[in-house]
Amino acid sequence: MKGLILSGGAGTRLRPITHTSAKQLVPIANKPILFYGIEDMAAAGIKEIGIIISPETGGDIRAAVGDGSQFGVDITYIPQTDPLGLAHCVLIAEDFLGDDDFVMYLGDNMLEQGLEEFVHRFEASRKSDNPATAQILLARVEDPRSFGVADLDDEGHVVHLVEKPEHPPSDLALVGVYLFDKTILDAVRAIEPSPRGELEITDAIQWLVDQDFLVRHEVLVGWWIDTGKKDPLLECNRLVLDTLLSHNDGSVDEQSQVEGRVVIEAGAEIINSTVRGPAIIGKDTRIVDSHIGPFSSVSHDCEIINTEIDNSVILAHSRITDMTRLTESLVGRHAEVHKAPERPRATRLMLGDHSRVEIHD
């Protein structure tokens, strides 16, 4: 079995962070989101992985992932010039996929349960007297209108799928993980673009159902988060931080306190500060005269001085000084945040497109 990870999206919902980097490389607990998917595939025994990349961010993804040897896998990069839908990704990956079964994974999704058992059950079905052609993962959601939605009959069989319906037939959303055999290529070639001009994977799976191919489904165990927006990304960061085991490869001076589950990476310095976990402090980062509260990830080569932070993700090479409290924030790479000392005091901003600022007097 092979793996196909979709990492070509523009990341418009995370701008301005994604103006300069791929959304799949935004870190969760100081690890790029994309790496979790690759590691899940490797754990499921998948060693050949194709990654769909865009012209805009493909170079960054190539630089971060490399040839896959750091994960024990072989990586093939597949450029997608135009974003023409998830099913289109299957078509452009045809040469890589060949006749093999494969798992398709959205590169900005995070799952608690991993892929191993999900993949193994599909492989078992493929060897049975009634082999599945596809297997989908579903999750119950409060508002299915933003997702592909599955409708099941009284016996639990998938009978209908629809993309982002105004009137959903159920609360079962398609999670961004799919298992297919080569028949999905016939399905994609048979469907037409949707009104938004894309080849929808839900339409391709519906074609399989209509042609009486067996489409298995499972309902997700544990959490699933699409990290494409700030608040879900911060929630995912909290969930992952809560699973970390403490270790300290940096230095903590006698005036500092480290409480709870905290990871301090090599070269990091904690000086006259408090770090309350769960939290992670990246390599060569300096925390001085500051308080780092729970559910905070501070990346590598940052400097935090005389500042309070909690429930936030701070990306690499950022410098934050003299902030009374920074909470529920996502701070991009090489950012500078500081309190202006001059009087009369005023708020001074330099913001990129699609920025959002909340100020409390």
Image (cartoon, rainbow, N blue to C red):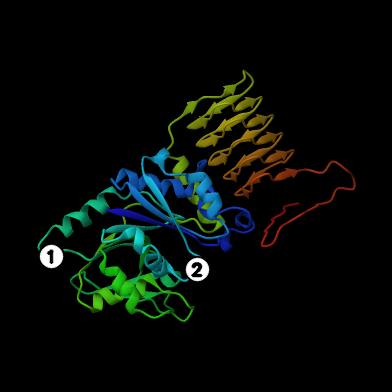
Residue 189 lies, with reference to residue 257, above or below; the image says below
Residue 289: quarter of image: top right
Q: Residue at x 40, y 48 (%)?
A: 75
Residue 136: quarter of image: bottom left
Residue 135 lies, with reference to residue 244, above or below; the image says below
Q: Which amino acid does label 2 sit on?
A: Pro
Tell me the distance, in whole angstroms, between the alpha carbons under discs 1 and 2.
Answer: 35 Å
What is the tally of numbered marks visible in this picture?
2
Tell me, yes or no, if residue 170 can be seen here: no
* Mark 1 vs mark 2: in front: 2
Horizontal arrangement in the rendering, residue 247 relative to residue 94 (left or right) = right
Residue 341: x and y in percent read 84, 41
- The kind of secondary structure element at disc 2 is loop
Horizontal arrangement in the rendering, residue 139 relative to residue 60 (left or right) = left
Give the labeled residue for mark 2: 83
Residue count near mark 1 (Cα–Cα under 10 Å), binned few <14, some 14–19, many ≥20: few
- Label number found at residue 96: none
Give the labeled residue for mark 1: 130
Tell me, yes or no, if residue 44 can be seen here: yes
Residue count near mark 2 (Cα–Cα under 10 Å), binned few <14, some 14–19, many ≥20: some
Q: Which residue is drawn at 62% across and 49% down?
A: 329
- The kind of secondary structure element at disc 1 is loop
Label 1 vs 2, first from the N-terminus: 2
Residues at marks 1 and 2 touching, judged by CB atoms closer than 8 Å: no
Horizontal arrangement in the rendering, residue 23 relative to residue 336 (left or right) = left
Residue 1: x and y in percent read 27, 53
Residue 41: x and y in percent read 34, 48
Q: Which amino acid does label 1 sit on?
A: Asn
